Amino acid sequence: MKCYNCGGGSVVSKKRNWVSYVNGIKVVTPDVNVDECQDCGEVVLDSSESEKIDHDVAKYFDKVLVLDNRLKEVRKGLDLTQEEVAKRMGWSKQRYNTVEKNKKVPSILLALKLASALECDVNDIYKLKIEKKPGMSINLARS
Ligand SMILES: [Zn+2]
């Protein structure tokens, strides 16, 4: 088979995982059949494979990434009070409280300092979580 893009002759059919991004969410469609040119890298999908990808991507149109805050769980795991963590940070208890309750999101620097004060990794206290977009009552995704 000849490549329509470069005219080269080495187009190979293969299966691969297709990666798309929707609202920053990584969506992987496994085992997509593609024709790939070994010369220029051009990739061609047939319509059924495209539909498979569209179907997976559509599931995320009404989703967003939100910040999942686990400060309270981690703090309690260390048997610390809010006051004690606030002291470690050089903050008032109120300031720590607004951050723990997710009313305020700290800067990256402060999140790293919080992780240090709580003897953990920043991913243990802040993670991205996929949620339904607020106010989206119509689900556009086909099931
Ligand atoms: Zn080519």
Image (cartoon, grey):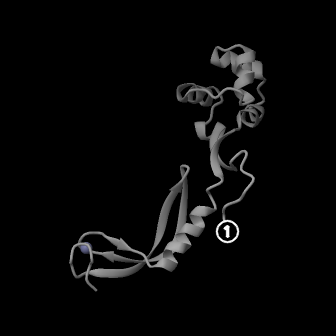
Q: Position of residue 34 (x, y in %)?
A: 41, 77
Classify mark 1: helix, strand or loop.
loop
Label tally: 1
The answer to whether 78 appears left or right of 33 in the picture is right
Q: Is residue 97 above or below residue 126?
A: above
Q: Is residue 113 above or below residue 48?
A: above
Q: Tell me where residue 86 sits by quadrant.
A: top right
Residue drawn 64% across the image and 29% down it: 105
Work out which quarter of the rendered image holds the N terminus and state it: bottom left
Residue drawn 67% across the image and 15% down it: 91
Q: Residue furthest bottom?
A: 1
Q: Tell me where residue 76 sits by quadrant.
A: top right
Residue drawn 74% across the image and 16% down it: 93
Residue drawn 55% across the image and 60% down it: 27
Relative depth, front residue between 95 and 117: 95
Q: Is residue 77 above or below residue 37?
A: above
Amino acid type, label 1: Arg
For label 1, count other residues whose C-alpha is less than 10 Å away and answer few (under 14), some (14-19) or many (20+).
few
Q: Position of residue 35 (x, y in %)?
A: 37, 78
Give ligand 1's quarter of the image: bottom left
Q: Position of residue 132 (x, y in %)?
A: 70, 51
User: In this figure, which residue is indicated by the disc labeled 1?
Assistant: 142
Work out which quarter of the rendered image holds the C terminus and state it: bottom right
